[in-house]
Image: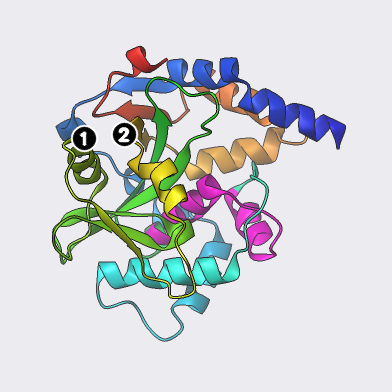
Amino acid sequence: MIFNKLIWALKRHPFLYTTRFKLLSKNASISEVSKYNYNQINKKEDIPKYFHEINEVVFFDGEAKTDLKFIKKISNWLVKNIKGGPGLSVPSEEALKIMLAGQGGVCSDMAQIFNNFCVVNKKLVREWGSTRAPFDKDYGGHSFNEVYCQELNKWVLVDVSYCTLFYSDNEIPLSVIELYQLLRSDKQIRFASFNNAIELDETIIYKNYLNPQTVPFLICDYSNKTYDKFLKLFRPYLPVFAIHFLLYLLNKSYHYRFPMDDYKKIF
């Protein structure tokens, strides 16, 4: 127990946090990040079998008619069946099993398993994170997703953990870039959960999204297959941050792209 607390403290230490960002971050234009998605590296056949099995349970009554309906259906199912808990640093199949057993899972875990379900269903998806500028050591960041909705011809931000979408002056959900362009222009932003069982806490939404110091970044080049392999091989012997650093040294790591802010001025 004491060892686990020590590892958690090390992972959250501001020096390690900022060092990770300095190593993994790149500045990018909005047009550049539009080219990235999770599906480019992660193929349906590479997603662990357990995701395919659970997907059949979720969609036992047939596929969703639109991409937006898919977002809502899979999100509602995950929230209903996952209680959440401690963060996980295990292979994706094991993570899903632990989460469905009610024994763990934070926002980044939820975002990552959501990515895999999107790949299984051939939906274009990507994962974003957020930090603060200037850097705030008391803010641990947040992870969320974006799905490309064919019927809307645009990317749509979804917070799976809260089954929440964001809007401006109409009923078309916002993308990540749209949200932060509006926020920084001091324009109206609405948010709503599509899960009737969830009572949204406005302080959480403000903390993770609408704080004017919030900075979004796109997580790129994450290979689920590669990370699963390395976690299975080395997790019993090495702490997670050492495994991530090994992947970085081997040039197999994910990286962060900042389309709206200069990360060098943040860290």
| Farthest-out residue, bottom | 61
Q: Residue at x 16, y 67 (%)?
A: 151
Three-letter residue code for mark 2: Pro
Q: In the image, 181: left or right of 141?
A: left
Front one among 168 and 254: 168
Label 1 Cα neighbours within 10 Å, binned few <14 / some 14-19 / many ≥20: few
| Farthest-out residue, right | 1
Vertical side of 26 occupied by 193: above or below: below
Q: In the image, 192: left or right of 104?
A: left
Q: Residue at x 42, y 54 (%)?
A: 202
Q: In the image, 19: left or right of 100?
A: left
Which label sits on residue 212?
2
In this view of the protein, can residue 192 be seen by the observer?
A: yes
Three-letter residue code for mark 1: Arg
- In which quadrant will I find the C terminus? top left
Label 2 Cα neighbours within 10 Å, binned few <14 / some 14-19 / many ≥20: some
Q: Position of residue 64 (x, y in %)?
A: 32, 77
Do the residues under discs 1 and 2 have CB atoms within 8 angstroms? yes
Q: Position of residue 219 (x, y in %)?
A: 39, 36
Q: Which residues are magenta?
A: 92-118
Which label sits on residue 184?
1
Q: Secondary structure at mark 2?
A: loop
Q: Residue at x 24, y 28 (%)?
A: 260
Q: Earlier in the sequence, mark 1 or mark 2?
A: 1
In this view of the protein, can residue 250 be seen by the observer?
A: no
